[in-house]
Amino acid sequence: MKNSAELVVRTYECDSYSHVNNANYLNYLEYGRMEYLHAINFDYKGLIAAGYYLYITRIDISYKVSAVLDDKLFVECEPKKFGKVSGKFHQRVIREDGTVCAEADVFWAIVSAETRRPVKFPQEFYVSGLEPDDK
């Protein structure tokens, strides 16, 4: 499954070059991932209440084309790997005209809130949308 979340570039996200600052793409990616988790009915709040965190362990991002003020953007999110402890999402930030502004692989792991160490993914929070369609 792939999900697309819409947003519009705001003034405070732009830098002195009049385009979206690199760091703001991380916020866009997080927004897109959370919208994806909502779309697949993943119980993120329940996961936290049960004593687990979903940590981002690495983000490999490639910036392609600058987004600017008032651009309508779509943040796509698609699972690419799901393992016992960790996984990977592939994300793209795309302008309304179809131009890819940034592309990223986002790696995550399930962590115990108590120990802050990786643990096996709790089965009670599994939903099929966490796995890639082409598993």
Image: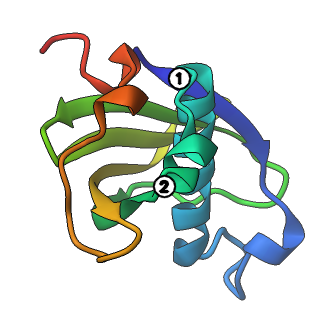
Rendered-image quadrant of the C terminus: top left
Residue 40 position within the rendered picture, expressed as x and y whole percent measured from the top left: 52, 20
Res. 17 image quadrant: bottom right
Q: Which residue is depicted at the point 24% across and 20% down? A: 132
Mark pair 2, 1: CA separation: 21 Å
Local secondary structure at mark 1? strand
Q: Nearer the viewer, residue 65 or 48?
A: 48
Local secondary structure at mark 2? loop
Q: Name the residue beneath numbered marker 1.
A: 3
Res. 113 image quadrant: bottom left
Three-letter amino acid code at disc 2? Val
Image mark for residue 65 = 2
Q: Is residue 77 above or below residue 27?
A: above
Residue 62 position within the rendered picture, expressed as x and y whole percent measured from the top left: 32, 59
Q: Which residue is depicted at the point 57% across and 22% down? A: 41
Crowd rating for badge 1 (residues with CA inside 10 Å; few <14, some 14–19, many 20+): some
